[in-house]
Amino acid sequence: MRLGGLTLLLAVLPLGLAFGESEAERSAREELERQLKSMVGTPPTKVRIELVGIDQPNYELLEASFVLDGRSLPVPNLKGLEAEGTHLIFHGDVKPGEHRLESKLEFRNKTSQVVSAEGGFKWKPGSEVTFKAASGIEVQIKVTPELSYSGDVKNRIMLKSPATVKMLAKLDDGSMPPPAERPKLVLAEVDAGVADAVAVKGETAAEKAAAAAEAKKKAREEALAAKQAAAEEKKQKAEEAKAARLAAAEEKQAARLAAAEEKKRAAEEAKNAKVATNQAAKAEPVVEQPAELPAEVDAGPAPVAVAEVDAGPAVVAAIPPTVPPVTPPPAEAESGLPMPVMIGIGVAVVGLLLFFLARRKKS
């Protein structure tokens, strides 16, 4: 077995013996690892952490934190993490052994509450994953937010962190294939000394299958996202139509109330006008016709008739009988003259008669 085989054995051996081994077996394995390392050197132990963008325009990423073994990892621009695809969070060397990754995100639905019931709602999904890293192995973790439209709205966004293993060295069967056809691996230096193993030539069947599976998964995710977007748009249009119907109903009700109020006001004005007319008719003054004086009250003819009395004693004896006829009868009192006036008129007539009689007697 050549150098590549020793490297692969060194990488796979810890994974195969890490579970269910006794203390003696563990000591033997560690001793074998030390011997192999002294022969071929120490292969790298890498971890790659990526975030899959949620690719939903209504969901805004407010915060993102990733803690690897108690150490916070730097996070790039949040706006860039919202886009579709995978975004590199960390890629570097770690020590062989067990590691722990804690991921926490915060999303907010930035639509209006009038348009969607989720407007302004926030979600803080999180995930924790524990994995083992060994020499010659790269552990790849994809932190993936997933949307779920079934169940409670609080569980709309869930966070998962699936981990896969990638080998950094391959077995060599000892043959000498043509250099042009044999896959070669090179270490490309990235920022801060981070190396990423990439294949320069050739592509194995496993890599082709992985690429096809990734493309299929991406197409399925895009179809699901399109379906969810169509459902959200349909729901939004239904809510807008409902709001328009409610506004039309409220406007119609307001117009009906205004018409009823106008009708009531017109009825009240007509009633008030009628009442005012009746009151004006009742308050119109009644003009009374002046009462006519009785024809008997006439001071002229009576003295002439009395002057014709010739004898003095006869005239004196005739005075008492002439007084009663001068008093107006009770029926004439109803013509409108007060009783005192009528009495005064009678007294005046008697006085005049006595005056004329006295003058006649002297003459």
Image (spheres, rainbow, N blue to C red):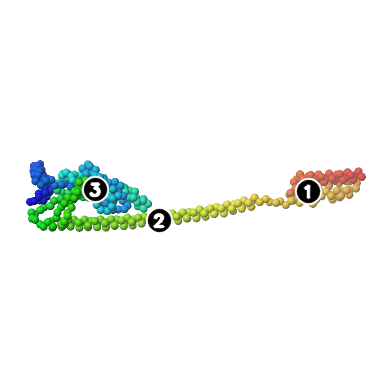
Closer to the N terminus: mark 3 or mark 1? 3
Separation of marks 1 and 2 at Cα, in angstroms: 94 Å
Q: Residues within 10 Å of mark 3 (few under 14, many from 20)?
A: some
Q: Residues within 10 Å of mark 2 (few under 14, many from 20)?
A: few
Secondary element at image label 1: loop
Separation of marks 3 and 1 at Cα, in angstroms: 135 Å
Circles 1 and 2 in contact, beta carbons < 8 Å: no
User: Which of 362/66 is in front?
Assistant: 66
Residue lying at 83% horizontally and 47% vertically, measured from the top left: 322
Residue type at mark 3: give it: Ile
User: Which of 160/311 is in front?
Assistant: 160
Q: What percent of the width, then of the height, locates residue 122?
A: 31, 47
Q: What percent of the width, then of the height, locates residue 64?
A: 27, 46
Closer to the N terminus: mark 1 or mark 2? 2
Q: What percent of the width, then of the height, locates residue 105?
A: 27, 47
Secondary element at image label 3: strand
Disc 1 or disc 2, which is closer to the eye?
2
Circles 3 and 1 in contact, beta carbons < 8 Å: no
Q: Residues within 10 Å of mark 1 (few under 14, many from 20)?
A: some
Residue lying at 16% horizontally and 44% vertically, measured from the top left: 95
Query: Is residue 251 in view?
Result: yes
Quadrant where the image shows the C terminus: top right
The residue singled out by tag 3 in the image is 89
The residue singled out by tag 2 in the image is 244
Separation of marks 2 and 3 at Cα, in angstroms: 46 Å
User: Which of 287/42 is in front?
Assistant: 42
User: Which of 10/163 is in front?
Assistant: 10
The residue singled out by tag 1 in the image is 328
Closer to the N terminus: mark 2 or mark 3? 3
Residue lying at 43% horizontally and 56% vertically, measured from the top left: 248
Q: What percent of the width, then of the height, locates residue 145?
A: 26, 50
